Image: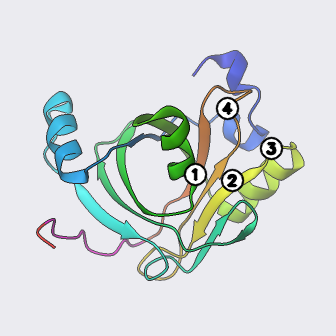
Amino acid sequence: MDPARKELLPPSLRSRPVAQVGILVPDLRAGMRTWGTLLGEDDWLVYTYGPGTVRDLTYRGAAAGFSMRVALAGTGPQVELIEPLRGPSIYHEWLQEHGHGLHHLGFHVDSIAGAIEDFRAGGIPLLQSGRGYGLDGDGGFAYFDTQDTVGVIVEAIEVPKRRRPSEDLAN
């Protein structure tokens, strides 16, 4: 990320490296094949996130019921493929305006609540969030409206201490 644009993020994120590149795909299995070949990666973790697996979901300031299936691979940065399932969500908005492809850059944070407050204090609106996707009810994600300043949506990610087991794609 351009250092001048990184200065537009809240101070708590400025010194952090990009931890994740989020890409919207029309079909998760096909996306994993394509991106796996490009990245030389075949070890994907797969999760479905939605009302049954994430405790608190919000979309544009209200309780939400969106869902998506994601595949995660690699580190430094991690690649996240996202297949939107049910909306409304920022993924569905993005698809209508931009189509499939790069959606966001993610940064690991110590506290999702703290990150939300940092962005709010900087006047950067929260678009969508979810809390409690970890095995112990921890973990969270929050997307912020940084397209006009940073050039892409920014996601803050509080990684859970323990994740649920990866899903089998046959299901």
Q: Which residue is mark 1?
A: 90
Q: Which residue is mark 2?
A: 127
Identity, as a three-letter code, of the amino acid under mark 4: Gln
Q: CA distance from mark 1 to mark 2?
A: 7 Å
In magenta segment, residue 164: yes
**Quarter of image, res 122:** top right
Q: CA distance from mark 3 to mark 1?
A: 16 Å
Residue at (22, 70) in percent of width and height = 167
Q: Is residue 85 visible?
A: yes
Q: Is residue 114 above or below residue 124?
A: below
The image position of residue 169, as x and y in percent, is 16, 65
The image position of residue 103, as x and y in percent, is 49, 38
Identity, as a three-letter code, of the amino acid under mark 1: Ile
Report the span colored magenta. Answer: 162-169
Q: Is residue 150 left or right of residue 94?
A: right
Q: Is residue 16 left or right of residue 67?
A: right
Residue at (46, 83) in percent of width and height = 136
Q: Earlier in the sequence, mark 2 or mark 4?
A: 2
Q: Quadrant of the C terminus?
A: bottom left
Q: Is residue 35 above or below residue 58?
A: above
Q: Nearer the viewer, residue 18 or 131?
A: 131
Q: CA distance from mark 4 to mark 3?
A: 10 Å
Identity, as a three-letter code, of the amino acid under mark 3: Ile
Q: Earlier in the sequence, mark 1 or mark 2?
A: 1
Q: Which residue is mark 4?
A: 147
Q: CA distance from mark 2 to mark 3?
A: 9 Å
Q: Earlier in the sequence, mark 3 or mark 1?
A: 1
Q: Which residue is mark 3?
A: 124
Identity, as a three-letter code, of the amino acid under mark 2: Leu
